[in-house]
Each structure stands twice: as structure tokens, then as C-alpha cells.
Amino acid sequence: MDPAHKKYALAEVPRYTSYPTAVQFTDAIGEADYRLWLSQIVPGEPLSLYVHVPFCQKMCWYCGCHTTVAHTYDRVGVYATDLIAEIDLLAAALPVHHGGLAHVHFGGGSPTLLSDGDFAAITAKIIAAFGARDDMELAVEIDPRTMNAQKAAALANAGVTRASLGVQDFNKHVQEKINRIQPFSLVKQTVEWLRDAGIGAINFDLIYGLPGQSVDDVRRSTELALSLRPDRLAVFGYAHVPWFKKHQEMIKQEDLPGMEERFAEAHTVGQVLQNAGYVAVGFDHYAHPDDAMAKAVGSGALRRNFQGYTTDTADTLLGLGASSIGALGPGYVQNAPAMDAWRNAIHAGQLPVIRGVKLDGEDAMRRAAIMTMMSALELDLAAHAEAFNAPINAMDDALEKLLPLAEDGLVTLYDRRVTVTEAGRVFVRNIAACFDTHWQPSAKRHSRAV
Ligand code: SF4
């Protein structure tokens, strides 16, 4: 790593899956705001839906998700019933003229912990309640340890078109340290079951910065992953926040790779994938050149939402399930993360929203600027400000903050046009932070940039 870039790797910056980020959500926003925002959805507007399933069969020590271990199926089954009640409530709150679903994503947790019957009932209810557009994508996060041929067929029968597998690392000594034993043969078999069932779009998640992991381990995992020909890969850096996620205390600090090693691991994954012809997407995704995400790079069609980079074009994302977040034109809303609070609200006939943030005009302009910066890796500030009816110098404060990053070779600045350099790609979160008027560099509430 260039010594001048170390300070950027160490900086704790938001991931900008939203702007303002979830740290700015407050209880000043609640159900009444959400109902009003839903009523303002314009006729024909396509919708996107995120469904959260907060259960897993076993806790992975690195996990940063909102989930809990389900020792028996009872709790999961009750949750499925309550999800169906929430679908009815949300559908009733929507104006009848919306344009139907363009994209549905089941995340967690482990959605594949749902029984085949419950998964089919939830997806059927979603399609009946909201309607599906012809080209609707239905994506599901998959824990390979929960899979078999029958489940793959059940997912396909329920309409699943994309499967996103949590792969992380293929090395046994790393898997032991993260409490996730998942041999290559199991992942390979899962991919075969899914493809045989007709689910052709396969995503993998890989993680670097894990305990006991080396550059060679990461290279081996990436090469093995490539042998299964995934369409897309998301490559995340492990965020060690044991004060926030108690189970991460099971990971010893001394087992974690240092900053230089983490950077080398991230670089190695990118190199192996790009040498194999995969296209770099934003700062942490890679796509096969034939995949729609690779084609979206450079065409302006690439977007960013709570799942990371996406080709989903809907401007409105609705959340279902405990802790899920919705993103609408006027702002963001979050469902109660606590299961009881979420359930009690639904049983009382209320949308279970407990916090959020409303955007003012300035926020809306900066949200679009940050999302464009994160996706297109360039932005004409003057044209952007004009599109929001603001003076062309409306974001010159960001230009000033970007000057040192330009001196360090992360961006080029020319006539209010910002372009991320190849060296800056991995630091695009630091670059986006220059547009953020809410973020405090001293507030330790985000993960490191690398
Ligand atoms: S399967 Fe995924 S959500 Fe569940 S504990 Fe492991 S990392 Fe977390």
C-alpha cells in the first residue's frame, strides 16, 4: 500500500448503502410519516421489496447481521405467519396505482431456514398482494449448510431467479476460527442443485480480513470460487466490532490480519477476479462480463442499496420483517428490530416502523451525489447541482475536502468534475464522505475503509 494511503484505509467511514446513514435515524419518524410517504408513490412506479428473516441455525463468529439462532422451527414458523400479516398491512397502505414489484430480495439471517412450505406461502402472498412485473427478479441469500436438492427445487418453484451464497472462505483453518464449517464440496453441490433446478444466476459473498487468513488463503478461496463460475461476487472486509456484536469476542484480536495484510488480501481477490475477466463494480463487487451488473457499469444503470450494488432500477424499496429498512423518495424508515415490538405492532394493525429520517432538499441532492460517486465513480458537480435547482457551487465544500485526496492520487478534479482514479476505487467511501454533511470523522460508528 502507498504509505500516503494508510490514513484512508484506517479511517472509519460509512458504507453509504443509504444517505443519510442509519446512524442519523431517529424516532421523530414513525408510522404516520411512512403511511404519508407510501401514499405519495407516483402512478406506475415500480417497487422493490426486501424481506428480512432473522434466524440462523448456528452463529458465525464474524457475523454483523441482525439475526439469532433458532434452536427449534417453532419461532421461525410463527415469524412466517406474522410476515404474511405484515404483507397485508403494507399492501393495504399502498396506493392502488403503483407499478408492481421489479425486485424482491430475501435476506437475513438465513432465509433458507424457512420451510419449503412457508417460503412458498410468503412468496405467493407477496406476488398476490403487490403484483409482479414481467421481468421481476426474486433473489435469496443462501446458507449452503441448509441446502439440499429438494430445497433448491422448492426455491425455483416459488419463483426464485437469483441465489446469493455466503461462501466467505474455503480454508478449513479459517472456517474453524469463524465457526462456519462449509467445505468446497458442499458449496459446489449447492450450486449444482440450484442450476439443475433452473436458478441460473449465482452470486457469491467472499470475506477478507478474517482470523487466521493469509493472502495465500484468500487467493485459494477466490480461485476455488471462480471454478464454480459465479455471475457476481461481493467481496467484504471483516469488520471487528465486538463491543457492538458480542459473539465477535470469540474471534481473538491477535488472529486478525494487520492493516497491510488486509489491504493485500483485498488487492489479491480483485487481481485474481480481474485476471479471470471479471469486471470491477464499484469498490467491492465483481461481475462476469456477460452479467447485467457488468453491463450496468459505465451505462449509468448501476445503483446502490442496502444489499450493496444492484441493477434494480426501482426508486422505492419497501422493507418487511424485523429490523428491515425501507428507502423512499422522502426518506428512510426502519422496522422495529426487537421481535416482540415488531410482532405487537403488526398484531395491533400498525406498520411496525419505529425510526427513520426525512430528507430535506440538501440531503436529496447529496444522496444522489454520493450514490453516483459510489456507483459511476465520477460526478460533474455543476450539472448535478443544476439538476437539483441549486447554484453550480452548491457542493464546493466537497471540492475543498477532496483537495488532499486529489494530492494523494485518489481523485482527479477538473472544472467541478470529480473522477475516481484506479488507486482511489478502493477508497471510494472516503471520497463519498467528502459530500456528507452529517458524518463526524471522530465518531467511531462505522467500519474501516479497508
Ligand atoms: S449464516 Fe449469515 S446471518 Fe447467519 S450467523 Fe452466519 S453470517 Fe450471520
Image: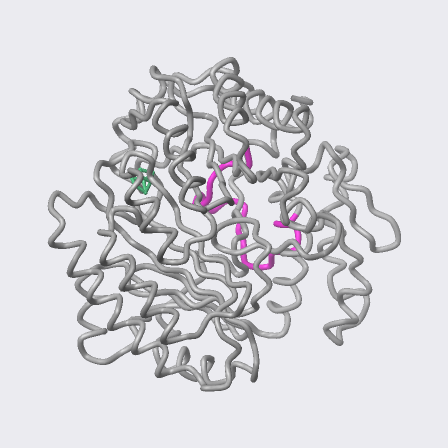
Q: Which residues are magenta?
A: 432-450
Query: Which residue is at 48% across, 21% downward?
Result: 221
In percent of width and height, residue 109 lies at 30, 47
In percent of width and height, residue 152 lies at 34, 44
Q: Quadrant of the N terminus?
A: top right
Of 70 and 251, nearer the camera is 70
Q: Residue 32 magenta-drawn?
A: no
Query: Which residue is at 48% across, 33% downward?
Result: 237
Query: Which residue is at 37% across, 23% downward?
Result: 185
The colour scheme used to paint the residues is one colour
In percent of width and height, residue 328 lies at 51, 71
Q: Quadrant of the C terminus?
A: top right
Residue 450 located left or right of residue 297: left
In percent of width and height, residue 275 lies at 68, 24
The residue at the far right in this view is 415
Residue 154 located left or right of residue 269: left
Name the quadrant where ligand 1 sits: top left
